[in-house]
Image (cartoon, helix red, strand yellow):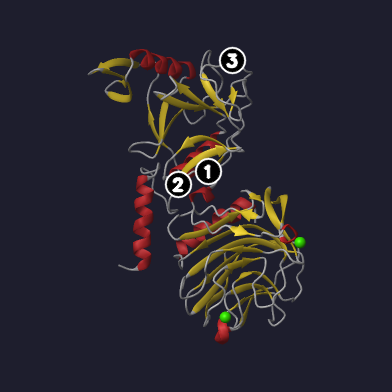
């Protein structure tokens, strides 16, 4: 079986296990649709089921409860909000169940309900204490155990619908959970959640802003993902957290050499600004050809200068023109990559100062290809990469290059020569996200 076919099968399997199993898509793991079952809240009945109770819509069982009172309470919530779609992340055995009213988030409040309030723009999916969780300000909201992709899908769904309240029927060990919108006085996530908050005032109806499109970037294929740095994620104490799960965090112990976070740097997203003097980060990712013969690197960056100077965006060069990319005076064009003693420096493209670009750089053991903003600018140039440092520098490339003067918003690395369809899907997601 070829590598790429094997990869496709892995991705397809992941896709089938995901929430959008009934939807076809060219984008692996894309959040193209939600996994929902429609029902009629007015015809749902509580029915005894052995020693338990279930909510039935005709012959379709929606939920099962141990307690009749809890089943009735759940039905009351459904009718109050007029839920008519029951949706899941991670069936079978869903990690998260939530409800919609047609395609919309339920809005409002209900007397006596038990909700935790959060900010959909602030929550994030992170691995905390060994499991993937939806977190905000160090508090966690949902736990997906080792189901990283499900945590990302849940995050995308929360952002898409603007959910701001996570609500429970019969905590602890709630028999039913639901998500809703609504700006009201329920318990904030940052304070200990009271099991039975005071009844909430009915809020004014919200203007129904159309939900933002779900970011397809949240559907980054996970197979072979070895580094994912996003300036929107924590950069504090000199550590830029690797979101890939591979723990290749980019670090700088010296405060004077840390890049600064620039809010709203590109397309409304932040970036890390490197001062061109001494700022550099080091990731434990080893891009030596004998360790990772094939790598595909996506980087969203800008440069303060367009000059042909010896400044590198990233690399591991310790002499001998090992893998590195940046500006270089030895090339006829500004942005270049190193290709070992045979390829040496090879032009990629002229870049302008203070303009944002998406670079895709793909190295195999004996070739290098590059794309700028999704357009190919180097096609399988023959290279002969030697051994370099066993870490990756970001904001420098090693071998006496100067530090990058400019910003990096996001960096994604796969330890694979991605198939074109996958590379293009990721490029499209990044170009969309940053408005390039
Ligand atoms: Ca500095
Ligand atoms: Ca070397």
Q: Report the residue marked by disc 2.
A: 148
Q: Reading the chain from its start, which is encountered first: label 3 or label 1?
A: 1
Task: Look at the picture and state if 145 lies above or below 396.
Answer: above
The residue at the point 60 percent across, 59 percent down is: 250
Residue situated in front as seen by the camera: 382 or 197: 197
Residue situated in front as seen by the camera: 124 or 193: 193
Q: Report the residue marked by disc 3.
A: 200
The residue at the point 45 percent across, 21 percent down is: 171
Give the class, few, some or many, for how many residues have Cα within 10 Å of label 1's Cα (few <14, many ≥20): many
Task: Look at the picture and state if 213 lies above or below 345.
Answer: above
Residue 267 visible somewhere in the drawing: no
Q: Is residue 200 left or right of residue 4?
A: right
Q: Marks 3 and 1, Cα distance to the nearest angstrom? A: 29 Å
Q: Marks 2 and 1, Cα distance to the nearest angstrom? A: 8 Å
Question: Label 1 near label 3: C-beta < 8 Å?
Answer: no
Q: Report the residue marked by disc 1.
A: 125
Element type where label 2 sits in the image: helix
**How many numbered badges does the structure rendering display?**
3
Question: Label 1 near label 2: C-beta < 8 Å?
Answer: yes
């Amino acid at each position: 079986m070829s590598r790429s076919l094997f990869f496709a099968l892995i991705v397809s399997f992941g896709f089938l296990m995901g929430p959008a199993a009934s939807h076809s898509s060219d984008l692996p793991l894309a959040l193209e649709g939600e996994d929902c079952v429609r029902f009629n809240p007015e015809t749902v009945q509580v029915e005894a089921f052995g020693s338990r109770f279930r909510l039935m819509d005709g012959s379709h069982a929606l939920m099962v409860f141990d307690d009749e009172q809890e089943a009735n309470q759940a039905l009351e919530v459904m009718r109050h909000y007029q839920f008519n779609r029951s949706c899941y992340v991670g069936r079978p055995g869903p990690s998260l169940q939530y409800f919609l009213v047609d395609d919309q988030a339920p809005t409002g409040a209900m007397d006596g309900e038990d909700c935790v309030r959060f900010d959909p723009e602030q929550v994030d999916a992170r691995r905390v204490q060994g499991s993937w969780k939806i977190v905000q300000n160090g508090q966690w909201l949902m736990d997906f155990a080792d189901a990283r992709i499900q945590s990302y899908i849940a995050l995308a769904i929360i952002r898409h619908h603007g959910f701001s309240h996570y609500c429970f029927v019969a905590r602890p060990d709630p028999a039913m959970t639901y998500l809703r919108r609504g700006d009201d006085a329920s318990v904030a996530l940052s304070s200990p959640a009271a099991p039975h908050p005071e009844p909430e005032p009915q809020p004014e109806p919200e203007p129904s802003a159309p939900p933002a499109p779900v970011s397809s970037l949240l559907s980054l294929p996970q197979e072979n993902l070895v580094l994912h740095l996003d300036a929107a994620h924590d950069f504090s104490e000199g550590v830029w957290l690797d979101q890939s799960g591979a723990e290749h965090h980019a670090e700088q112990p010296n405060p004077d050499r840390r890049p600064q976070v620039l809010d709203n740097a590109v397309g409304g997203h932040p970036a890390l600004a490197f001062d061109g003097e001494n700022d550099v980060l080091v990731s434990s990712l080893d891009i030596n050809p004998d360790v990772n013969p094939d790598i595909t690197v996506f980087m969203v960056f800008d440069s303060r200068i367009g000059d042909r100077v010896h400044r590198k965006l990233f690399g591991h060069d310790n002499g001998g023109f090992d893998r590195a990319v940046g500006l270089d005076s030895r090339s006829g064009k500004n942005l270049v990559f190193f290709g070992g003693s045979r390829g040496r420096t090879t032009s990629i493209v002229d870049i302008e100062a203070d303009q944002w670009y998406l670079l895709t750089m793909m190295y195999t053991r004996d070739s290098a290809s590059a794309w700028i903003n999704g357009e190919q600018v180097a096609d399988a140039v023959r290279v002969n990469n030697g051994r370099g440092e066993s870490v990756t520098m970001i904001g420098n490339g090693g071998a006496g290059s100067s530090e990058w003067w400019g910003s990096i918003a996001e960096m994604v690395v796969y330890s694979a020569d991605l198939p074109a369809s996958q590379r293009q899907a990721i490029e499209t997601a990044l170009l969309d996200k940053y408005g390039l």
